[in-house]
Amino acid sequence: MDTTLLTTCRYTGKTRVVGSNESEFRYCRICGGYTDKTVGSDRKTVYDLTVDNAVSEVRETISADNLLHQEQWRCSHCGEPVENYDAIEALITSSQTLHDSAVEGVAVGEYAVGSKATFQTAIDAAQAVVTADDSTQAEITTATSTLQTAKETFEAGIVT
């Protein structure tokens, strides 16, 4: 079987390249296909219309609440829903930034000694859910909630 059929998004025509643009794709656990994660996002659409033998160009923005948004999380190969990682990926990024900029100590504005390691463990656990090809939406939602709680706990541990 030609694997490029499952690594090319049928909606956008983009092809997933290992080590290059992998993060731009969503994996379908049902058929093993990949769909470009920008499917369904707001986009500019251009129509060329012929009016009185003259070509005119009409531009419109298709909003995210349109039908395309409903297809945003559907596999381009089998049509089944694929998981939405946007919230957890954003939370991982902001959590890692907070972690990396935090300083442990006893001075005002520093974080309790050992709290960075605990927080990093929570970040790593969330990242493991993102990188696993078989994560369900329920697991993603739970990991997002768990990381959010860990972030709030970490932020509350700042020395005042």
Image (spheres, rainbow, N blue to C red):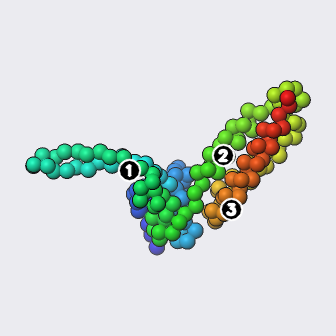
Q: Earlier in the sequence, mark 1 or mark 2?
A: 1
What residue lies at 70% left-to-right and 42% top-to-bottom? 95
- Residue most toward the left? 53
**Cβ atoms under marks 1 and 2 closer than 8 Å:** no
Give the labeled residue for mark 1: 62
- On the question of residue 69 being in view, the answer is yes
Residue 89 percent across, percent down from the top left: 62, 49
Residue 97 percent across, percent down from the top left: 69, 37
| Element marked by disc 3 | helix
Closer to the camera, 20 or 135? 135
**Cβ atoms under marks 2 and 3 closer than 8 Å:** no
For label 1, count other residues whose C-alpha is less than 10 Å away and answer few (under 14), some (14-19) or many (20+).
Answer: some
For the residues labelled 1 and 2, the Cα–Cα distance comes to 27 Å
What residue lies at 40% left-to-right and 48% top-to-bottom? 43
Residue 43 is left or right of residue 95, and the answer is left
Task: Tell me the quarter of the picture where residue 40 sits.
Answer: bottom left
| Element marked by disc 1 | strand
Q: Earlier in the sequence, mark 3 or mark 1?
A: 1
Q: Quadrant of the C terminus?
A: top right
Give the labeled residue for mark 3: 139
Residue 107 percent across, percent down from the top left: 87, 26
From the viewer's perspective, is residue 81 above or below residue 119?
Answer: below
Mark drawn on residue 132:
none
| Element marked by disc 2 | helix
Give the labeled residue for mark 2: 91
From the viewer's perspective, is residue 50 above or below residue 154?
Answer: below
Report the amino acid beneath label 3.
Glu
For the residues labelled 3 and 1, the Cα–Cα distance comes to 31 Å
For the residues labelled 2 and 3, the Cα–Cα distance comes to 15 Å
